[in-house]
Image (cartoon, helix red, strand yellow):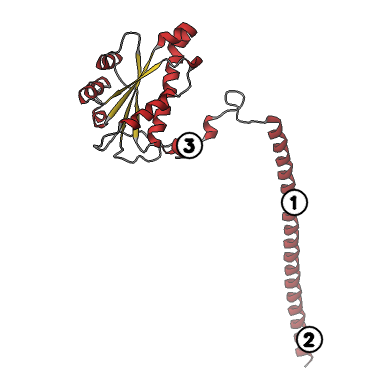
Amino acid sequence: MELDKCIKTRRSIRKYIDKEVHWDLVAKIIDAGRLAPSAGNLQNWKFIAVLDKGKKQKITEACLQQTWMNKAPVHILVVAEPKKAERYYGTRGERLYSIQNCAAAVENMLLMAHNLDLGACWVGAFDENMLGRAVGLPDEARPQAVITIGYPAEKIKEPAKFPIENVAYFNSWRGKIKDVAGYMGYHSVKVQKGLQKGKKALKKGTEKAAEKAKDVAKKIKKRIEEKQKKSNNKKKFKEVHNAK
């Protein structure tokens, strides 16, 4: 699948058919996460593939009772190791870079799943302690996401998205123009063209009004002449009649 098509057609799938997902496909998805960028290339993440029904049930309970998750054949937990990032980047590494690293890995896995004709959903609502206990996480590891994987049993319509002009700025916050000087020059040219067009329209309108006025004057003159002619004819008729 072409990358742009994969990005545009990926959807969050929450309904799955009862069909096993082979391990080689799961491995490809995890490998896509492994190849994601990370701060300082620390790769302070771990991925836990869960296929056991009992453990998936515990994960579902930890994810605020989202029962639809039980239907997914595979759960993949994305787990951060914040202390590794803290050693290099301090608090920022622990609290920000670790989250960013795992988020990049999650998106890679979502796209790979879609590319393999599988459905996936990024789940971020969960009780950390419950989720950690479900898979035996040590204290230094923090769960960041659960990805459900399976063959989709639903087709999701394209969700509404803001157009690019609503979310992209240039050079500064709310900067809407990429080349200000160029735009202003272009804008000036447009204004001049608009003024010239307006002048032409005004001139044309004036000429039409003048022509219309001439036509009206001609019609009035013609009516006056016709009335005068009729009046003269009546006068002549009376003169001839009286002479007789």
Q: Is residue 122 left or right of residue 6?
A: left
Identify the residue at image location x=53%, y=34%.
164
Q: Secondary structure at mark 1?
A: helix
Q: In the image, which disc is placed on residue 3? A: 3
Q: Are marks 3 and 2 in contact (CB under 8 Å)?
A: no
Vertical relation: 126 (above or below) 225: above
Q: Earlier in the sequence, mark 3 or mark 1?
A: 3
Residues 34 and 125: in front is 34
> Which badge, 1 or 2, is on the more N-terminal residue?
1
Furthest toward the left, the residue is 54
Q: Secondary structure at mark 3?
A: helix
Query: Is residue 213 or residue 139 the one in the foreground?
Result: 139
Q: Measuring from the top left, give residue 104's x and y in whole percent.
A: 44, 23
Q: CA gap, disc 1 to disc 2?
A: 58 Å
**Residue to which mark 1 is pinned:** 200
Residue depicted at 41% across the width and 11% down the height: 82
Tell me whether circle 3 and circle 1 mark residues in contact (CB < 8 Å): no
Taking depth in this image into account, of 189 and 57 the one nearest to the observer is 57
Residue 79: give x, y in percent of width and height: 36, 17
Query: Which kind of residue does numbered mark 1 sit on?
Result: Lys
Distance CA(mark 3)–CA(mark 2) = 103 Å
Near mark 1 (Cα within 10 A), the count class, few <14, some 14-19 or many ≥20, is few
* Amino acid type assigned to the residue bearing label 3 in the image: Leu
| Tag 2: amino acid | Glu
Above or below, 1 against 136 in this view is below
Q: Pinpoint residue 114: horizontal percent, then vertical percent.
A: 39, 35
Q: Which mark is residue 239?
A: 2
Q: Earlier in the sequence, mark 3 or mark 2?
A: 3
